[in-house]
Image (spheres, helix red, strand yellow):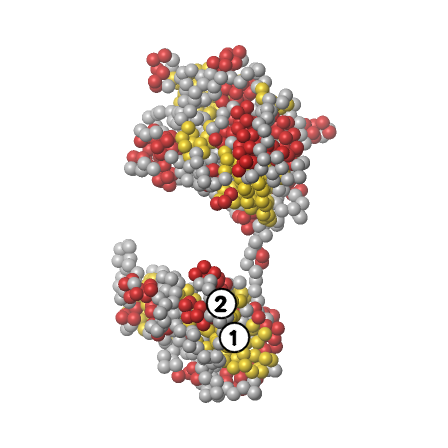
Amino acid sequence: MSERSERTGGAAAQPHRREGATGKTLRFRFDGREYAGLEGDTLASALLANGVRAVASSIKLGRPRGVYAAGCEEPNALVQIEEPFPEPMLTATTVELYDGLVATGLPGQGRLADRPDPARYDAVHAHCDVLVVGAGPAGIAAAGVAARAGARVILADERPEPGGSLLGTAETLDGAPGREWAAGEAAALAALPEVRVLRRTTVLGHYDDNYVIAVERRTNHLGAQAPANVARERVWRIRARRVVLATGGHERFVAFAGNDLPGVMLAGAARTYANHYRVLPGSRAVVFTTNDSAYAAALDLAGAGVEIAAIADVRQAPGETWAARCAERGIEVLTGHVVTAAMGEGEVSSVEVAPRPEAQGSGGQAREIPADLLLVSGGWTPVVHLFSQAGGTLRYDEELGAFTPGETRQAVEAAGFARGVRTLRECLEDGAEAGRRALAAAGFAVPAETTPPAETTLPAADEEPVAAPSEHVWLVESGDYGTHFVDLQRDVTVAEVLRATGAGLSSVEHVKRYTTAGTAHDQGKTSGLLTGGVVAHALGVDVAELGTTTFRAPYTPVSFAALAGRDRGPLHDPVRVTAMHEWHVARGALFENVGQWKRPWYYPRQGEGPGEDMEAAVLRECQAAREDVAAMDASTLGKIDVVGPDAAVLLDRLYTNMMSTLKVGSIRYGVMCRPDGMVFDDGTVIRLADDRFLVTTTTGNAAAVLDWMEEWLQTEWPELRVHCTSVTEQWATVALVGPRSREVLARLAPGLAVDNDSFPFMTWRDAEVAGIEARVCRISFSGELAYEINVSSWYGLALWEAVMASGEVTPYGTETMHVLRAEKGFPIVGQDTDGTVTPQDLGMEWIVSKKKADFVGKRSFARADTSRPDRKHLVGLLPEDPGVLLPEGAHLVDTSALPEPPVPTLGFVTSSYRSAALGRTFALALVSGGRERIGERLYAPVGADLVPVTVTSHVLYDPEGARRDG
């Protein structure tokens, strides 16, 4: 290929590309076919240049859909990028073309990638005096005024180049094409030291105190050529003193039969394709409009070579200047007319135009006009999403037929068309004025008012046409509304909206949820106000009375990868391992994720044959703990150092039982509750000194408990002199369990008196264990004689190896721990509780102090609800078939045959195991009125069977506690 054809893109291969289009040729593939486009294209413009009309299909009806818009408001053309990395649910109108792009059209939903995304994503924080959102005429004017006064300015725009609406028109400023003027102004701004111009950056959300979130697409447009060391997307977290919203507007369509066919397009979008991308979206067009803006589009397209067959204007009196210009070009203007249907097989081939019913007296019949393009303009809607998110109120503009910004308590300005300003010259002046207001509010000296930011002209005349009032038409009336679409992506028709209002719904929010209109990727940018208009028409009320649906962030879809940034993989959820981890790995342990920790789950023995499965390994480990001696790595339990003169006061307030009476050298088990009286966490409290305690927590709740303590200290009891510090990683802990544990400990710590009288239950001693300084606690989570040996984590492996070398000590994992504790009825918070369980429900009335004046949750125990006899209690379950293992989560009923739904449930299984000590299976469950049901038969639906079970006490093994002391 010659250099010239390489630079021009081989226009002959793109039959709908205008002459004179320049740019490097880019090769891409869509739906399995090879195409060529030009540098600067979007995927949508490149497809249109190649004559591709149907890009996707609709989600419910499977109807073919084509390109409808030219920006983020696109409701139809959803695609999936396949190469270089799969990314679903993108709009073809915002995907920048790059060499080697591979994409497919989507039926309203995509496919997630089956491999990790190799790209980098990051986030930055920024501060500025003035943030301007939108680099159109008003935004550039506002940023220019603020920047030249010395303010720190950020100008953010979602497009690759500045200009906004100027990119799609033939208007000139200061004698230059609008596109060139915008590029020059943006370059001048970017050269200023306190200005940052962010291109390809969409502001997604506007929050309290002008906290704004934006996403910059940095390398998406480069495809496989993207540098590996540059983040693909960047999240900007911006705090601005003042915000100027120059966000422009979206054109909306009208509901008529077949308004979803490929070839139906917004008039402003067609103008953009013709002027900006040098692409003709059709060869013969009909224009359907309710306002003047479509005339400019029609004239631009006519000048580009598109035959304009007719303009159907719903108004009886359009702007005289526009009508005269159309007459000069030989374009027929049909006033008082509507398009009743777009027709064709798979795409537009003709358009039916007819007088409006109220204009029938003027004569004229419906006629069919051959055309492959139908341009629609139902009016323009200001983009008020961010203004509304910021807490601003909206008011209905009767002339515009749309909602515009009203009042706001935040430091926010709206400028240009975003607040309903119509003409280019007025937008420039309004933007400059918004910049001045933002400067003044930010405390800067405001420059004297100067001449307009630029002189504007239209190419066809010295003066702008005098505007004629718009007429607000939402739908073309018909006897059948089955193909009058109001939301193209959701396949919502006028018929469905009428069904909703016919069902009694009168709120636009309710209709939205009934029909799903406005809930797709475009969030109703083109359909939201149209849906409201149809609802108003159906109810016979004014649109202003209905209001709008709620505008929520994000403004446009954002990838989860961008939101995650570098917070993914090990950086999102770091893998934490104990000091003994490598030993566990070397011995073939399988691991369970508990919080962020890798905990040994069980240790299958590998011998000849397949080796032990989980059931066999756990039964063996349980038997060792009950009959001999076993050891577990318990280092992951949360440990919090609580120090200060008021440490005991804090713990008394947080725990349900008394901690201040605990003697130095002693340990007490405790439960924390939330203010509603429900169990939050449990663990032990070790008193190290008068003013120092070591609190242990469950592994997964360690951070939450520390946050809980800090929340109360910082917000409710700041007068308490207490410091709380996490010391989980500073200690390695070995739990030594079983009848022979005292014997093993005596050999490891010859200087420690380990008899029961010298070292009673729930006390601790400092000693040397295996030559290592240690704190030894007599605590048991198994019901057996047990010790927890704590050493500095540096010596954790040495201690573990010494324990393992001391005799026939069996290592056991978390699954065995669960079986042992469940046999004793010890609950695990988060497994045997679900946020609705009190200590009393767990059979732990004894742990709720009656002596303390107050503690967190105390008042809730006096509520009638917490003492209902039908509350769910923790109980044991014994399947009548001792070999049946109930699935955890199984529901419980009291009938041997299930009644017709809904089936009342008495509770559910929380833990279920096979027990070596009991010689059978058993379970724990939360059952309504459970303690009063002991001895009763209940049933657990498991698949098609009802498994009979007997309710028993939740303490199934050694209820007297005789084994605890050896």
Picture quarter with the C terminus: bottom left
Position of residue 933 in the picture relative to residue 835 (left or right): left
Secondary structure at badge 1 equals: strand
Tell which tag, 1 or 2, sits nearer the viewer: 2
At which x and y percent is residue 495? 35, 32
Q: The residue under label 1 is which amino acid type? A: Met
Q: Earlier in the sequence, mark 1 or mark 2?
A: 1
Q: From this viewpoint, which residue is outermost toward the right?
A: 3
Q: In the drawing, what numbered circle is on residue 402? A: none
Position of residue 943 in the picture relative to residue 243 (left or right): left
Decide: is 399 above or below 790: above
Foreground residue among 336 and 245: 245
Residue plotted at (45% across, 88% down): 757
* Residue named by callout 1: 632
Residue plotted at (38% across, 25% down): 476
Q: Which quadrant of the figure has residue 222?
A: top right
Can residue 675 be seen by looking at this rendering? yes
Decide: is 150 above or below 421: below
At which x and y percent is residue 324? 50, 12
Foreground residue among 842 and 94: 842
At which x and y percent is residue 46? 59, 31
Secondary structure at badge 2 equals: loop
At which x and y percent is residue 876? 35, 71
Picture quarter with the N terminus: top right
* Residue named by callout 2: 721
Residue plotted at (36% across, 36% down): 508
Question: CA–CA distance between discs 1 and 2?
Answer: 36 Å
Residue plotted at (34% across, 19% down): 357
Mark 2, other Cα within 10 Å: few <14 / some 14–19 / many ≥20: some
Q: Total number of numbered labels?
A: 2
Foreground residue among 876 and 871: 871
